Image (spheres, grey):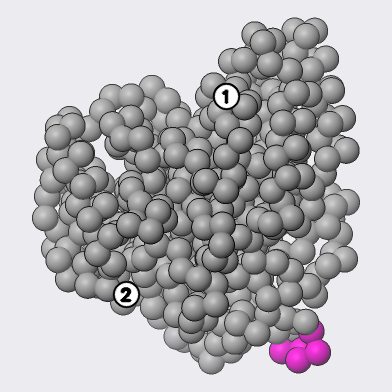
Amino acid sequence: MSQALRPVHQLAPALADRTLSPVDLVDAYLRRIERLEPKLRAFTDVQAANARLAAEAADKAIRAGHAAGPLHGIPIAVKDLVEIEGQIAMGGTAAWRNRVSPRTATLMRKLYAAGMIVLGKTHTVEFAYGGWGTNQHLATPWNPWDATTHRTPGGSSSGSGVAVAARMAPWAIGTDTGGSVRIPAAWNGIVGLKTTIGRISTHGVLPLSPTLDTPGPITHSVQDAALLFNVLQGPDPLDPRTIGVIPTDPMPTLTRGVKGLRLGRLPTAERAGVDADILSAYDRAIDVLANLGADIVDLTLPLRFADLGAINGRIMSAEAYAALADLVDDNAAPLDEAVRPRVRAGAAISSRDYLTALAERERIKRSFEMAVAGLDAVLTPTLQTAAIPVAAVDQNATPGMLTRWVNFLDLCALSVPNGFTVGGLPSGLQIVCKGYDEATALRIGWAYESATDWGQRLPPMTEG
């Protein structure tokens, strides 16, 4: 098996015992990028020379017994919202083609401290504001599960999702404001973890909606998601929301299984609008978890997911406009025609409406806590459909009907592969847990992943 096809939890021990060299590993990924990138267009910038230098340094450190930790020498791709001092960070917009970052994000410093090697920056929807994964002026990455039709890669972390799915990187950093880690994970047949606010510092991550933005891992496997989560989490004096959030290591409970856990099933009313193939995969996933010993509970929720998503959208638009008004109101700026009106919509939201939405959020959070009391997780499909042709995208609609509510309620969630449509496109199972309970989401995801083989499949156009 090519080294680039192995998950990180297999690569790391091979690097540590020196049966695999960081130089050879980085070269394997760069060769795949060279071969696949002209078609897939996942990266804004491939940092081949720097990656090779870092790999040589990692190799020497490991051979000298000076490894920074168990992940020293592991490559990673990083969404182009994450700042690295002195490098370009475009945030998905052609208007910032020459924008040089004045600082390095805290999460990047954590990756560097662990000895990881950046392969490059990945494409995002402009300002990270959109779930389809399209980008009018820079690039819309190609979903690797269909070699002939350009399908939605999922957004806003489009390039990170495609890079990991195509094994051009073993894992990647995404961000999630309304589903932007989970959507590309589901449409690309991989794993994505939406973390709770305060788990991972957003210092140095270009903001869309500070109330809702959360960085998170996009990976091949649940175990890899847990490993990267551990590296990224922790208090940061430059992000006040992280102060007082006690890091939680998910590894000790990862393999405990789901026996005795109480898992909420998607309410019947929420099944409307979900494609038949997606519902079939979801129902089979529920059966798998029930057979593993989980107690499946029918849910009654106080509000529809669409209603929660709408309020989430108001908060997002208001905060995005506050940050980006000067740019989006400049009609000469080369902005995405689909994104500019989304941000401009925030101009119509008064301060009273914005504050009312925040207060309503706190009230609804309490009502949902009561509705799911006694449950360990809520299970839904991640998305209502499989990836659609880019040419068929309705930019006035959102694919995040089943994801936005998670951000609104400040919960955490994991998307794992749970099947394929008749046409061979992947679908995802969303595992939603209470805020700061990422360990349980990962535990459920690991149990499901271990009982199935969906996540082991490789997009046909990227094999070899």
Quick check: 385 above or below 31? Answer: below
Label 1, residues with CA under 10 Å away: few <14, some 14-19, many ≥20: few
Can residue 148 be seen here? The reply is yes
234 relative to 254 in the view: left or right: right
Which image quarter: residue 166? top right
Question: First in sequence: mark 1 or mark 2?
Answer: 1
What amino acid type should be assigned to the residue bearing mark 1?
Met
Say what secondary structure mark 2 lies in.
helix
Q: Main secondary structure of the magenta part?
A: loop
Is disc 1 in contact with disc 2, using a CB cutoff of under 8 Å?
Answer: no
> Which residue position is annotated with label 2?
306
Can residue 174 be seen here? The reply is no
Label 2, residues with CA under 10 Å away: few <14, some 14-19, many ≥20: some
Rounded to the nearest whole Å, what is the CA distance between mark 1 and mark 2?
A: 44 Å
Quick check: 338 above or below 36? Answer: below
Q: Residue 200 location in percent, x, y? A: 56, 45
The quarter of the rendered structure image containing the N terminus is top right
Q: Residue 149 location in percent, x, y? A: 54, 66
116 relative to 147 in the view: left or right: right
Stretch of the chain drawn in magenta: 329-333
Say what secondary structure mark 1 lies in.
loop
> Which residue position is annotated with label 1?
1
Residue at x 41% of width, y 30% of height: 250
Question: Of the residues tagged 1 and 2, which is closer to the observer?
Answer: 1
Quick check: 405 above or below 246? Answer: below
What amino acid type should be assigned to the residue bearing mark 2?
Ala
Q: Nearer the viewer, residue 416 or 462?
A: 462
